[in-house]
Amino acid sequence: MVCVLIAVAFYTLYERKVLGYIQIRKGPKSVGFWGILQPFADAVKLFLNEMILPMKSNKILYVVAPIMGFALALFLWVIYPSKYCVKFISFGLLIFLCISAINVYCILLAGWTSNSKYAFLGALRASAQTISYEVSMLFILIVPVLLILETNMEMALEGYTIAFLMFPLLLVWFTTTLAETNRTPFDFAEGESELVSGFNVEYGGGLFALLFLAEYANIIFMSTMSMIWFLYNNNLMVFVLGIVVFSTLYLFSRGAYPRHRYDLLMMLCWKSFLPFGICMLFLCLLWFF
């Protein structure tokens, strides 16, 4: 868990550096050598801020929501495949789907308990987006599971690479993870120009930091899932390099694409990605029988 938090901290610095060079400017460079201590300075600043609770909010659930989101983001890493695991989880994929589904409740709680119309509107949009793309994500993930006949992530690394066999499937999977983690160009949950930061608009200080850490931990885990199910490799260095490449693609998409319209996002899911995932699943079943 400590390694995950350190990775998230430096991933935020990496994002600011990449976006800075994409926009032809410098990222953080003053705190420490090349800005290397900037994530720790941000963490200290956020957690030392006063925790202000909105007057008419449901105060207990208002505090519970970000803690719950952060805890679920860390729980996902329990199923991370490692050669040094003491206990192997046979149905790691099923646990991943269950925990990612529960994440919707954290967003809904954060928006509803704030007792703010802006936050509640952002929570509704985010929950509808997350639930919709979970359906297409499920059908896409079933395809590599059927091809290697394994739901244990540790054993999945012993399989074979299907990204080159079904490259369009990998592209659809990556786009789905962008929407699932609320990243640009699908960051409608936090559309600053429309929703004043969305469901977390009333949060500040340490509670906002927990929501922030949960989001970035989920991004890194989705990059790990991409490597496990689509680019199987037992070599640790290649595996880590692949995670870095997928994580960088999230940043490039943020720097390159504008935010789309919300109705087009939902249409993309229900009219394009979902039929595509069902067709790929049907083709796999035909190949078996």
Image (cartoon, rainbow, N blue to C red):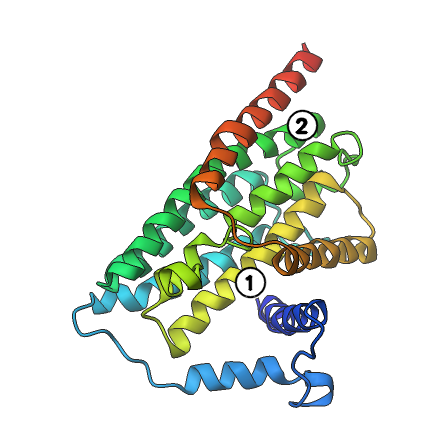
Report which residue position mark 2 lands on. 149
Q: Compare residues 271 and 156 and report the one nearer the observer.
A: 271
Which residue is depicted at the point 42% across and 51% down? Answer: 103
Could you say which quadrant of the image residue 28 lies in? bottom right
- In the rendered image, the quadrant that contains the N terminus is bottom right
Residue 122: assigned label:
none
Q: Compare residues 9 and 145 and report the one nearer the observer.
A: 9
**Labels 1 and 2: the sequence-earlier one:** 2
Q: Compare residues 210 and 234 and report the one nearer the observer.
A: 210
Question: Disc 2 on helix, strand or loop?
Answer: loop
Disc 1 versus disc 2: nearer the observer: 1
Q: Is residue 100 left or right of residue 196?
A: right
Residue farthest toward the left in the current orientation of the protein: 56
**Number of callouts in the render?**
2
When the figure is inspected, residue 24 is found, relative to residue 104, above or below; the finding is below
- In the rendered image, the quadrant that contains the C terminus is top right
Could you say which quadrant of the image residue 18 lies in? bottom right
Which amino acid type corresponds to the residue marked 1 in the rendered image? Tyr
Residue 216: assigned label:
1
Q: Residues within 10 Å of mark 2 (few under 14, many from 20)?
A: few
Q: Is residue 69 left or right of residue 222?
A: left
Which residue is depicted at the point 63% across and 23% down? Answer: 280
Which residue is depicted at the point 55% across and 62% down? Answer: 216
Image position, residue 17 (x, y; %): 68, 73
